[in-house]
């Protein structure tokens, strides 16, 4: 089996295991939900079948044991219990481990889980076929004509026939009429087809599950016979005869490795840079014909860019669905009854943002359960339902996505935060901090209101990780809390990190980019007005006094400042701050490039971009610049 098939299976299995976990959690809430039972069974069957075809025999055999028990659940002969859900979630984790391991794994845990599942069987036989059934035998006539290229797809029809034979008494007739003359035989093509007579207690769905990977492309006819006219049923391919033929499916999808998408985005970035250079040349030469060509190239470039960026957009629901298990397990560990609800799962974000969003969301949810949600007895005394709730919501807001993590717990005790900050020496006893400033202390490295250190909290690491991750995504985070009612964390994130709208500015001969989403306005700063402030970097804007930071000084840029400078007013790190530059050039679409190794540790910069003339502009990290200035002022 080639590595390509194995890698494809690993990619697909991750999605199927997520679906399995989600279905199990729903089944736990509604044990009689037939749809959820079907989803669990299909997920297990798909993993078993795909695993066997991809060379993961250990995964296939293990999953078969789990599937055998869920066949009883599907037939209504075994009730769903919390113990069974717990065991199946453990089996799901084991399947994941088996898929990710490259051999040498200790299988004691595997044997332990298999033994636990076999206890659910009516007899200690370990095989689904040996399960006695109260259902009557039904005889099916099956015609299976696989596509000629079935071998090229990694599927062995013999394995399908063997699996079919495991369902009951089976008689197979092989048709060889289509085999060509010896000199014309292509050994990579299948020239056989089969008629099968199967007598089984299993239903039509069990038979169709055998052909789940090929039924779309083969001729498959299944007829139940001999049990009365009302039970006759025929299935052809993936539809029954009494169904109207559906319209041709015009929507299809292709699985592409993310590295190829990243490479495509890089090429688009290069194209955008070249297009900007072409526009600059056309503008300088005042050539009407060249202007026309430049405008067409610009239009096509932006259309291509938008299409490629859209390809990278993924719904955030796949990330949300992973947290159901976290909430369940952590709530159980801490003795709290917590349920997770979600909203806006269809909201799309760039795949890079989604990939980097998982960790901060995990820390926020853990924080909500550990610090926010009260134990059931405490909630009842407070007049709340014993079951706590965590709500995840996502929505678009202009060029951003807003994500809320909300709990209905006890809220944040600001007095406790203040006292803890004083004890750590972060603020003085006389400090007059508003609520927002007190909330900001929660993100300080090493800050925790937990009375003791546990395996969940107490080291003051989680919220620090959240802040760093969100800053790294060029986003922001706000906290709102009411005592006794709960806390809401609101994350503001850009749609994409590949290309951003920026404001291009200049200091001496150097160019810098402000993220346009953070820019509020630009005002002039005359040298005489600056001198009147007597060295204090403050500017008055419509009666409001605002601080500003001189980027020339921050980056030690030599040269003389102009008589009239520009102040770019922004919202950075939760406050309005101005940044003084020599000149505002204008808006610019910035294709973000990572900084080289030598510049990676330079604080205040988040990346770079190449301008149309080939020069480099540095992209500013505004929250970090504010933090640097604050640390210098202390």
Image: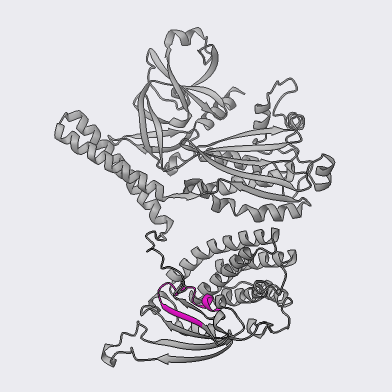
Q: Picture quarter containing residue 402? A: top right
Q: Residue at x 49, y 63 (%)?
A: 11
Residue 499 falls left or right of residue 427: left
Q: Is residue 610 visible?
A: yes
Q: Is residue 97 visible?
A: no
Residue 445 drawn above or below residue 171: above
Residue 578 falls left or right of residue 166: left
In the rendered image, residue 233, in percent from the top left (x then y), is placed at 51, 79
In the rendered image, residue 164, in percent from the top left (x then y), is placed at 53, 83
For the record, the magenta segment spans 207-223
Residue 551 falls left or right of residue 182: right
Q: Picture quarter containing residue 286? A: top left
- Choose between 272 and 16: the one closer to the eye: 16
In the rendered image, residue 70, in percent from the top left (x then y), is placed at 65, 72
Residue 554 drawn above or below residue 127: above
Residue 15 drawn above or below residue 485: below
Q: Residue at x 55, y 78 (%)?
A: 204
Q: Quadrant of the C terminus?
A: top right
- Choose between 146 and 112: the one closer to the eye: 146
Q: Is residue 214 magenta?
A: yes
In the rendered image, residue 272, in percent from the top left (x then y), is placed at 31, 41
């Amino acid at each position: 089996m080639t590595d390509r098939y194995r890698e494809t299976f690993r990619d697909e299995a991750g999605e199927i295991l997520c679906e399995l976990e989600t279905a199990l959690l729903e089944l736990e809430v509604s044990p009689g939900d037939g749809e959820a039972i079907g989803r669990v069974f299909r997920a297990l069957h798909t993993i078993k079948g795909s695993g066997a075809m991809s060379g993961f025999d250990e995964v296939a055999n293990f999953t078969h044991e789990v599937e055998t028990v869920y066949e009883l659940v599907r037939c209504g002969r075994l009730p769903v219990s919390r113990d069974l859900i717990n065991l199946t979630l453990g089996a799901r984790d084991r399947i994941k481990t088996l898929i990710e391991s490259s051999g040498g794994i200790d299988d004691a845990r595997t044997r332990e889980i298999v033994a636990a599942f076999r206890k659910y069987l009516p007899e200690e036989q370990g095989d689904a076929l040996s399960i006695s059934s109260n259902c009557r035998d039904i005889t099916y006539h099956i015609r299976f004509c696989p596509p000629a290229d079935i071998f090229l797809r990694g599927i062995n029809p013999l394995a399908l026939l063997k699996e079919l034979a495991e369902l009951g008494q089976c008689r197979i007739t092989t048709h060889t009429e289509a085999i060509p003359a010896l000199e014309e035989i292509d050994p990579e093509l299948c020239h056989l087809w089969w008629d099968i007579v199967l007598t089984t207690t299993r239903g039509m769905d069990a038979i169709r599950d055998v052909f789940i990977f090929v039924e779309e492309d083969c001729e498959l006819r299944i007829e139940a016979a001999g049990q009365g006219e009302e039970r006759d049923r025929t299935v052809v391919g993936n539809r029954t005869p009494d169904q109207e033929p559906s319209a041709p499916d015009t929507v299809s999808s292709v699985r592409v490795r993310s590295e190829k998408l990243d490479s495509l985005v890089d090429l688009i970035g290069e194209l955008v840079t070249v297009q900007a250079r072409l526009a600059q040349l056309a503008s300088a030469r005042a050539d009407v014909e060249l202007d026309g060509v430049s405008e067409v190239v610009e239009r096509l470039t932006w259309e291509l860019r938008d299409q490629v960026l859209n390809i990278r957009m993924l719904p955030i629901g796949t990330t949300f669905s992973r947290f159901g298990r976290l909430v369940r397990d952590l709530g159980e560990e801490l003795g709290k009854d917590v349920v997770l609800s979600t909203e806006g799962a269809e909201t799309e974000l760039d795949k890079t943002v989604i990939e980097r969003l998982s960790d901060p969301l995990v820390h926020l949810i853990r924080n909500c359960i550990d610090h926010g949600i009260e134990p059931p007895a405490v909630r009842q005394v407070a007049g709340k339902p014993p079951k706590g709730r965590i709500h995840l919501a996502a929505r678009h807001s202009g060029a951003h996505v807003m994500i809320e993590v909300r709990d209905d717990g006890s809220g944040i005790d600001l007095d406790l935060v203040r006292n803890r900050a004083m004890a750590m020496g972060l603020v003085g006893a006389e400090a007059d901090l508003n609520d927002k400033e007190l909330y900001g202390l929660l993100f300080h490295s090493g800050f925790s209101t937990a009375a003791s250190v546990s395996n969940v909290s107490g080291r003051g690491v989680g919220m620090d990780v959240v802040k760093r991750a969100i800053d790294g995504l060029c986003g922001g985070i706000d906290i709102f809390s009411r005592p006794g009612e709960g806390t809401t964390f609101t994350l503001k994130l850009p749609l994409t990190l590949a290309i951003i709208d920026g404001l291009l500015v200049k200091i001496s001969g150097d160019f810098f980019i402000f993220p346009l989403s953070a820019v509020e306005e630009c005002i002039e700063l005359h040298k005489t007005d600056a001198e009147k402030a007597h060295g204090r970097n403050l500017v008055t804007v419509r009666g409001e006094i605002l601080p500003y930071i001189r980027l020339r000084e921050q980056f030690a840029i030599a040269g003389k400042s102009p008589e009239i400078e520009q102040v770019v007013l922004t919202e950075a790190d939760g406050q309005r701050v101005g940044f003084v530059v020599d000149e505002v050039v204008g808006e610019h679409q910035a294709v973000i490039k990572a900084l080289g190794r030598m510049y990676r540790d330079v604080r205040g910069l988040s990346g770079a971009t190449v301008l149309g003339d080939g020069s480099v502009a540095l992209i500013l990290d505004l929250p970090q610049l504010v933090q640097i200035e604050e640390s210098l002022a202390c």
